[in-house]
Every structure is written in structure tokens, then in C-alpha cells.
Image: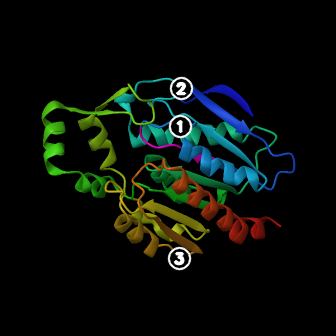
């Protein structure tokens, strides 16, 4: 495992984690969600599944999150996360282990970023695994409790404790985040997504619920799977849920990715 810092287009530091496979079967990029970081249990679980199947795996902290990269969480947007994904992949293209097509997997806000990238560069992507993904900014906003949205609109901040980093209070520039999010809807370009796709969400996920994932799933024309983890919320933390997810990933990789790469 190797960790290093690269610069994004704004000359900010991005922390990148590289796990190389000696007998490389493929390349996978794994991306965290809003306020997340590359060492979270669920992000590590996705990455380990690819690693066990012989993929070189790249994880990274976007800017404006709670990881080791630059920026401030309050300034986080889909645009900034997406641009960092583009910049990491652009950097990777110069590395000896780089291979196309590669696999993209992301959680929540990272999920929509991986979908947006794939819709823009479909020829580069072997397979796509957006987990508990945002499907559109409007749909996610509509899923929020109205009273909470009214409070965030009033104060201009969405304030919440971090469950992944206890003691840390997350303060998000709410209006900036919403205005940016409303620009994005992955349902508009699903015709470009013909590669294998894996969708997973928790039965108790109320922000990016199964119903959102099913709408996206139904518009996909390639080989596809959708799974609901019973009892799981938006961010997977329970050991039994993580084990179930890893098993789903391993079977999916065997079924679709290793066959393609032979």
C-alpha cells in the first residue's frame, strides 16, 4: 500500500491510496461520499473485494471533506467531488499500472460522480458500481424532511455530527450545495451506460432510498444487478452488512469482470 499527495486543477492537495496487485487483473477506483474519507469501513470493503480479485485499487480523499486532502467541508459540492475524480484519473493515466477500461465504484455523492464520469467517458469504463448513490440533486432534496430543509434554508447551514469521526461536527454551506446539486440528474444520459452495473442500497436508507436506485436501474440497458441490504441505513457500518456487501461484490466481479478481462 502506498499513500501520496497529488495536486488537483485548483492546486489543492489530494491524498491518494494505491494498492497494487502483482498479477494485475484490472484497475478500480473507489470513491467516498459527502463528508467521507478513503478509510471508512464501507469504502475499504468495496476496495478489498476488488483487491482480492487481483485488481489494483485506487482510493482517495476528495477536497472539501473530512479526510487528508485540502479544502473545507463547508465548501463541498458535487462539482468539486466530480472534478477531483477526473483529476485523480487524469493523474493515474501517467502511472505504469494504469489500464483501460477500468472499474468505478462510489458511495452516495461518490456514486453520482462515478455515474457522471461514465456517462461522459463510457469507453473508459469497464463496469460501474454506484452504491447508495445520489441519482439526482432534486430527488435527494425531495427525500429530506421538510422541516429540516426549512431550518437549513433559514440558517444557510446543514449542521450534523459525523458518525465516522465521533466528536467532529459537520457544517455544510447548504444553499451553495443545493444550488450545485440541482444541476445534476444522471437519468438524462443512461443510454450511454451499457457496461455491467451493480447497485446496492440499505432498506433503511431514506436519503438515497431503494426507490431511487430502482428508477436508475430500470433505465440501464446492460448487464445489471440491484441488491437491498435489510436493516442497513445510508452508510453501512454493521459487520454483517459489510460482509454481505463484500460477498455481493465478489460474486459480481467473478460473474462479469473477470470474464471480460480474460
Q: Position of residue 258 (x, y in %)?
A: 76, 65
> How dense is the environment of label 2, judged by Cα within 10 Å: few (below 14), some, or many (20 and up)?
many
Q: Where is residue 97 in the image (x, y as percent from the top left)?
A: 80, 43
Please report the residue visible at 44 percent of the width from the left and 30 percent of the height from the top: 165
Quarter of the image for the N terminus: give it: top right
Q: Nearer the viewer, residue 22 or 124?
A: 22
Q: Name the residue under label 3.
A: 221
Q: Mark 2 points at which residue?
A: 69
What secondary structure is marked by label 3? loop
- Between disc 3 and disc 2, the foreground one is 2
Give the colouring mode of the picture.
Answer: rainbow
Q: Report how far apart the C-alphas of labels 3 and 2 lie in the structure.
A: 36 Å
Q: Which of 8 and 248 is in front in this view?
A: 248
Q: Which mark is residue 175?
A: none
Q: Where is residue 144 in the image (x, y as percent from the top left)?
A: 24, 51
Q: Nearer the viewer, residue 17 or 103?
A: 17
Quarter of the image for the C terminus: give it: bottom right
Please report the residue visible at 75 percent of the width from the left and 53 percent of the height from the top: 52
Q: Is mark 2 in CB contact (under 8 Å) with mark 1?
A: yes
Q: Report how far apart the C-alphas of labels 2 and 1 lie in the structure.
A: 10 Å
Q: Name the residue under label 1.
A: 84
Amino acid at each position: 500500500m502506498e499513500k501520496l499527495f497529488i495536486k488537483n486543477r485548483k492546486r489543492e492537495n489530494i491524498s491518494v491510496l494505491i494498492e497494487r496487485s502483482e498479477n494485475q487483473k484490472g484497475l478500480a477506483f473507489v470513491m467516498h461520499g459527502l463528508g467521507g474519507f478513503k478509510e471508512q469501513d464501507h469504502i475499504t470493503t468495496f476496495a478489498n473485494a476488488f483487491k482480492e480479485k487481483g485488481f489494483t485499487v485506487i482510493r482517495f480523499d476528495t477536497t472539501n471533506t473530512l479526510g487528508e486532502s485540502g479544502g473545507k467541508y463547508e465548501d463541498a459540492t458535487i462539482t468539486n467531488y466530480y472534478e477531483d475524480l477526473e483529476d485523480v484519473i487524469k493523474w493515474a493515466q501517467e502511472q505504469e499500472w494504469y489500464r483501460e477500461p477500468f472499474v468505478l465504484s462510489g458511495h452516495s455523492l461518490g456514486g453520482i460522480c462515478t455515474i457522471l464520469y461514465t456517462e461522459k467517458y463510457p469507453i473508459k469504463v469497464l463496469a460501474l458500481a454506484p452504491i447508495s448513490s445520489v441519482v439526482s440533486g432534486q430527488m435527494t432534496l425531495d427525500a429530506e424532511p421538510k422541516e429540516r430543509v426549512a431550518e437549513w434554508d433559514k440558517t444557510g447551514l446543514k449542521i450534523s455530527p459525523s458518525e465516522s469521526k465521533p466528536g467532529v461536527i459537520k457544517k455544510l454551506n447548504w444553499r451553495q450545495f443545493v444550488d450545485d446539486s440541482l444541476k445534476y440528474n444522471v437519468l438524462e444520459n443512461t443510454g450511454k451506460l451499457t457496461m455491467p452495473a451493480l447497485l446496492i442500497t440499505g432498506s433503511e436508507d431514506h436519503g438515497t432510498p431503494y426507490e431511487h436506485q430502482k428508477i436508475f436501474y430500470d433505465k440501464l440497458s446492460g448487464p445489471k444487478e440491484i441488491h437491498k441490504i435489510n436493516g442497513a441505513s445510508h452508510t453501512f457500518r454493521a459487520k454483517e452488512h459489510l460482509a454481505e456487501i463484500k460477498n455481493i461484490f465478489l460474486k459480481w466481479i467473478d460473474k462479469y469482470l473477470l470474464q471480460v478481462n480474460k
